[in-house]
Image (tube, rainbow, N blue to C red):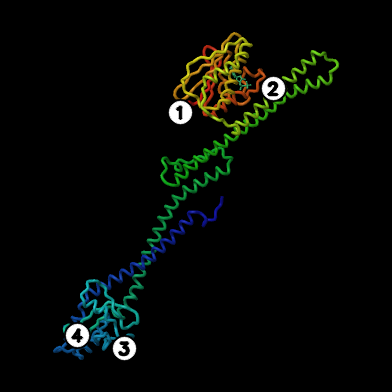
Amino acid sequence: MARFPAKTLYARLALGLFLLLVTVGISYSFLSSYTLRHYHASLNQEFNRDLARNLVADRNLVDEGRLDEDALRELFSLYMTINPSIEIYLLDLTGHILAYSADPSKIKRKRVSLAPIHTLLADMEEYPVLGDDPRSHDRRKVFSVTPVPSAETPEGYLYVVLRGEEYDLVETMARSDQFIAMGAWALVISLVLGLVAGLAVFHLLTRRLARLTRRVEAFADSDMTEVPAATAAASPTPARDEIDHLALRFEQMATRIAAQLEQLRDKDAERRQLVARVSHDLRTPLASVQGYIEALELKHDSLSAGERQAFLGVARRESHRLGRLVDELFELAALDARETTPAPEPFVLAELVHDVALKHGPAAARRGVQLVVSGQPPAAMAYGDLAMTERVLDNLIGNAIAFSPEGSRISLVMSGDERFLEVAVQDQGPGIPEQDLPHIFEPFYRGSAGESSGHSGLGLAIAERMMTLQGGSVHAENCPPAGACFTLRLPVAEV
Ligand code: ADP
């Protein structure tokens, strides 16, 4: 899929990084220039702290305890020409400017604030102390100050502003040329280096994301049956970071989706097969009933009373079969939809087994089959739905009778431990062919032996669901020397 470049994560990250670097660069230059100036001012003031006092001493400004005004004027004119980096002011005790060494047109203030003067004279160790610059209404500068004519009898102050205006000009020019150029170069170089490094890192990171995105898109555009393969670099184990984690999770999710789709397809095929089988199984007895009824109608007069009776008998049996099939289908559907739910309660399993054996005794006897109950179950009660368990036992015993040869024996063997109680229904019939065993509990599976028995093949499917819903189970195997063996199991009731 084509993308507008600015919309890619990489482009956004690159833009973000660029803006970040520019911001950092600009704030860095401002901060460093500020700290540099602060540092220079501190140094300057510390070195020149005694400048005012030394000027008074060196230039003999005080003569016999009084300020020598001629010497002061001389000093002013001298410093205006030879050292424009300082400006000298004579202040009275309230801070008013009495005389100065500068061009009068440039003096903007009549007095300077006394607080910084007192701070500096109080010998504080914290530099810089900024005082008012008489040449500006708001600018403040470092200075040196001394009381005149002496500290003992002060009449005013000699106030020396360090870094005077001319010096400022020179410095500003120098800075604009050199310092700014250097700073700009440093900024540009670090910006470019940072940008290149950042872009390389972003490229590495977003490359993996782009690869993962391509895989997700490929999966979304496919029929979702196969997870797109990852390159070796894209799926490291164990996961290194969030992107690897994401890739891993995507793989797990895609595998699950593929498996579930496969399952859905299988289920769909199963459902179609079921519908086909149901319609087939319903149609056969229905056609038979219809056939006999039509024959009775058409040939009513030509049939003997015995034949008519026989036709009606077949139609009745077939309609019974149809009815049973419909009932079983409903039962299975209700169990699958969880509409029929078990009502579990503790009951004595041995009692149920004896009752069911008694109930099936006559049917077994009619086929010349012996039904015996054996085994010593634990005294514990079983926990399950009594009616459902009886229904399952009916089905298993019914099947066993149907498959038992005359003169054989069906055993109902009870056993158990502290967790489960079991009843095994063993017959001496043909048993279940090995290839049928895994499918025996599937709906409509009649096995090779039962194909022609006229049974629906739903009984075991219903039995299996009933046992599972109760928290029990049923399983089939062949017991040596011959015969099928179905074992149902129920949990022991907790006391
Ligand atoms: P139905 O409800 O039609 O009796 P079942 O689901 O109970 O069907 O049984 C399905 C198939 O399992 C039977 O058709 C038969 O092939 C096999 N089967 C069940 N019980 C036995 C048994 N005791 N001996 C041999 N085969 C059996």
Element marked by disc 1: loop
Which residue carries the number 2 mark?
321
First-in-chain label (1 vs 2): 2
Q: Which mark, residue 495? A: 1
Quadrant for the C terminus in the image: top left
Q: Find the distance from the CA under tag 3 to the CA under tag 4.
A: 26 Å
Q: Looking at this view, is 145 or 30 the one in front?
A: 145
Mark 2: which amino acid? Arg
Q: Which mark, residue 154? A: 4
Q: Is residue 51 above or below residue 284?
A: below
Q: Label 2 CB, ligand 1: below 8 Å?
A: no
Q: Position of residue 308 (x, y in %)?
A: 80, 16
Which residue carries the number 3 mark?
104
First-in-chain label (1 vs 3): 3
* Mark 4 or 1: the one toward you: 1
Farthest bottom residue in view: 70
Element marked by disc 2: helix
Q: Label 4 CB, ligand 1: below 8 Å?
A: no
